[in-house]
Amino acid sequence: MKTASSPPVSRFAAVLAASCAFAIAFALHTVAARAETGKAANEAALGAAIDDPARPAAERARDRYRHPLQTLQFFGIKPDMTVVEIWPGGGWYTAILAPYLREHGKLYAAVAPGPRSEAYRRRLATDPKLYGAVTITELGPPDHWAIAPPHRADMVLTFRNVHNWMRGGFADKAFEAMYEALRPGGILGVVEHRGNPKLPQDPKAASGYGREDYVIKLAEKAGFHLVAKSEVNANPRDTKDYPKGVWSLPPTLRMGKVDRDKYLAIGESDRMTLKFVKPIHMAQDRAKARSAVDLK
């Protein structure tokens, strides 16, 4: 008795299906390998910027409190991004971001209007090779809110500044300016001194601390969505109840010699590290956020 053989078309279909499955698997493997290679290269470039011996020794000594590698990785920074750093102070993070973004990305520095930013501008002027590609803009009253070309930035970063805007009475405007600068899907990274959640929030943040839930509501009111939190900059030794507020701690040490060793042992403040996204459907979501968020 003869056994019927498989029709040629069926055999061809089986071979074709197997070939397609192999091609798809190989393509997925290649994409994953390239992504892993890119991730490693990004991490190496960021590490090189952080470990650069050209960074002042006093600034590098603070890495153990500020965790720049882990913080920037958490926010998802990449070297080809357009990034806006808000109120960069003396330029501690700029010294990392500028070389990291210099070749393939773009860095805007939105400084405080007026003389508060003079030292920062002088620092950038001292090293045109390192800082020459940084574009300085301004953020603050009465009318400095255009911090970058609108809807173009991939990432906006601000480190320990929200309390300053609360004290100045323009926190809402600051978050709106950051929202305006970001493209839909762009990331806002916020690091801020974290206040005691059991105490009412002083709307002026006189102590320098902001409750985490309050800061989140400020961002949500502007239209942002919270993506994730990190404890990378947490400090459980910080009791947040000092005579001179957060400035009692290093690096300011506003109490002078009084209890200096105590404050040095505590270290820098306990900090929230928050990652937000500007929604794709921004107009509708922003309108909903403004009507729903109640700051208390």
Image (cartoon, rainbow, N blue to C red):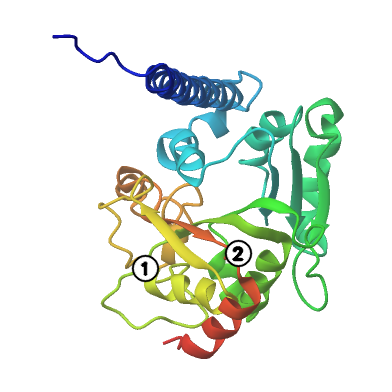
Three-letter amino acid code of the residue under disc 2: Ile
- Position above or below: 167 against 139: below
Three-letter amino acid code of the residue under disc 1: Gly
Tell me the element at label 2: loop
Between 12 and 247, the one lying in front of the other is 12
Left or right of residue 104: residue 31 = left
**Mark number, residue 245:** none
Q: How many residues crowd around disc 2 within 10 Å: few (fewer than 14), some, or many (20 or more)?
A: few
**Mark number, residue 195:** 1
Left or right of residue 49: residue 289 = left
- Position above or below: 167 against 68: below
- Residue at image x 59%, y 69%? 164
User: Residue 246, can we see it?
Assistant: yes
- Residue at image x 81%, y 66%? 146
Q: How many marks?
A: 2
- Residue at image x 67%, y 64%? 178
User: Residue 167, can we see it?
Assistant: no
On the image, the x and y values in percent for residue 255 come to 44, 58
- Mark 2 = which residue? 280
Left or right of residue 248: residue 134 = right
Left or right of residue 59: residue 70 = left
Between 292 and 260, the one lying in front of the other is 292
